[in-house]
Amino acid sequence: MAEAYIVAAARTAGGRRGGKLAGWHPADLAAQVIDALVARSGIDPAAVEDVILGCVSQVGEQATNIARNAVLASRLPESVPGTSVDRQCGSSQQALHFAAQAVMSGAMDAVIAGGVESMTRVPMFTPNALPAKAGLGTYMSPAMKARYPGVEFSQFTGAEMIAKNYGIEKDALDRYALESHHRAIAATRAGAFNEEIVPIDVLLADGTRSGERHTVDEGIRFEATLEGIAGVKLIAEGGRCTAATASQICDGASGVLVVNERGLKALGVKPLARIHHMSVMGHDPVIMLEAPLPATQRALKKAGMSIGDIDLYEVNEAFAPVPIAWLQALGADPSRLNVNGGAIALGHPLGASGTKLMTTLIHALGQRGKRYGLQTMCEGGGMANVTIIERL
């Protein structure tokens, strides 16, 4: 079977809700990343055989196949198709897996995988709230309710369950959140994100360009203190998690260009990384966010590796208990985890986060001269994707 290589990886800087990316229609925002991947790789736009984009809230401006709409908003020709993926927060990581599987099979030679989410223009929970308001029902079917009687699936509940089950107290969550900001601050000041970020014009309310370019993740709190983080009110009375120890609402887009050996030969470029392993696993949908732990353990076993073989890991910071519990379960080195900060500081643009994390992981491996990287993230419904790459 052919290998799958990543030859370009890019992302926008994260935008706060109502912030510097709020003026962009999500299809146009995704198109900016698509165009950047084409430009950075030097690929003939017509040679891209598919575009697979992750997006969680596929309604409103993100409805009707956002991937195809992004293609039509980009410089790619109309001959390039597009399809959209929803594996909740792992949507664009799954898009990467589908792209890799396509080129490894030989069915295609060059595929763009990515994701987009405008949490400003399509607020979280909109796909559920609008039909419910219109009396069109809910995703919870009678059979699901019978299997999980009285359960209201909630990531907030799952985060609290993990904190309790793994003995993670609030002060540990607060310290972890501060460290996320500190690492993101250090990375930003050192220029670690410069190569991966696509500069985006800031649009005014009337759609005209303001003259400002968005190049710095808006969620980073450069003046963050432990006292400030610790003072944020609890999400649930008697709980341990707060908004300060959870991922930030974020607008953004990201993507990678994936090719096989034929695509690599046609491009004539050196690949950034090779896909070494990819898998996905379902787990308890009630605790929901715990899936990355067993999924990583299984992935390492299937890959014939140990956690010590992995130089850097990106574990999405949906809520601080997730990466902390992951470190405990894997016996992993905290100094290798989310070395440039995570979603607590940088934001979590839902469907875009998978290839966002992959983009950061690839560049971090290159900057440090390291070889193997692992990415995983918790997903709604109790699932987790795991991707292991080898930097080349």
Image (cartoon, rainbow, N blue to C red):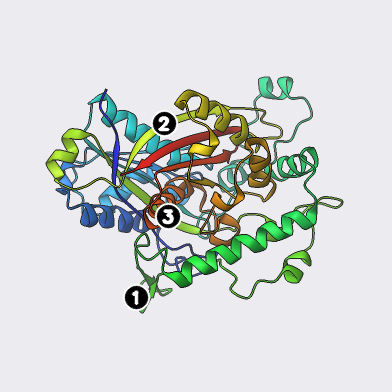
Residue 364 is marked as 3
Mark 3 packing: few (<14 Cα in 10 Å), some, or many (20+)?
many
Nearer to the camera, 295 or 14: 295
Nearer to the camera, 106 or 285: 106
Mark 1 and mark 2 in contact (Cβ < 8 Å)?
no
Q: Amino acid at mark 3?
A: Ala
Which comes sooner in the sequence, label 2 or label 1?
1
Residue 243: tell me if it is visible. no
Mark 1 packing: few (<14 Cα in 10 Å), some, or many (20+)?
some
Secondary element under disc 3, as helix, strand or loop, is helix
Q: Is residue 171 left or right of residue 276?
A: right
Q: Position of residue 41 (x, y in %)?
A: 21, 52
Mark 3 and mark 2 in contact (Cβ < 8 Å)?
no
Which comes sooner in the sequence, label 3 or label 1?
1
- Observer-side mark, 2 or 1, equals 2
Asked if 4 appears above or below 113 in the picture, the reply is above
- Observer-side mark, 3 or 1, equals 3
Residue 336: tell me if it is visible. yes
Nearer to the camera, 275 or 208: 275
Asked if 227 appears above or below 75 in the picture, the reply is below
Quadrant in the rendering for residue 391: top left
- Residue at 21% in and 50% down: 76
Residue denoted by label 2: 277
Secondary element under disc 2, as helix, strand or loop, is strand
Q: CA distance from mark 2 to mark 3?
A: 19 Å
Asked if 279 appears above or below 358 in the picture, the reply is above
Residue denoted by label 1: 209
- Residue at 26% in and 56% down: 35
Split into 4 quadrants, where in the image is the C terminus?
A: top left
Q: Position of residue 258 (x, y in %)?
A: 29, 40
Q: CA distance from mark 3 to mark 1?
A: 32 Å
Which comes sooner in the sequence, label 2 or label 3?
2
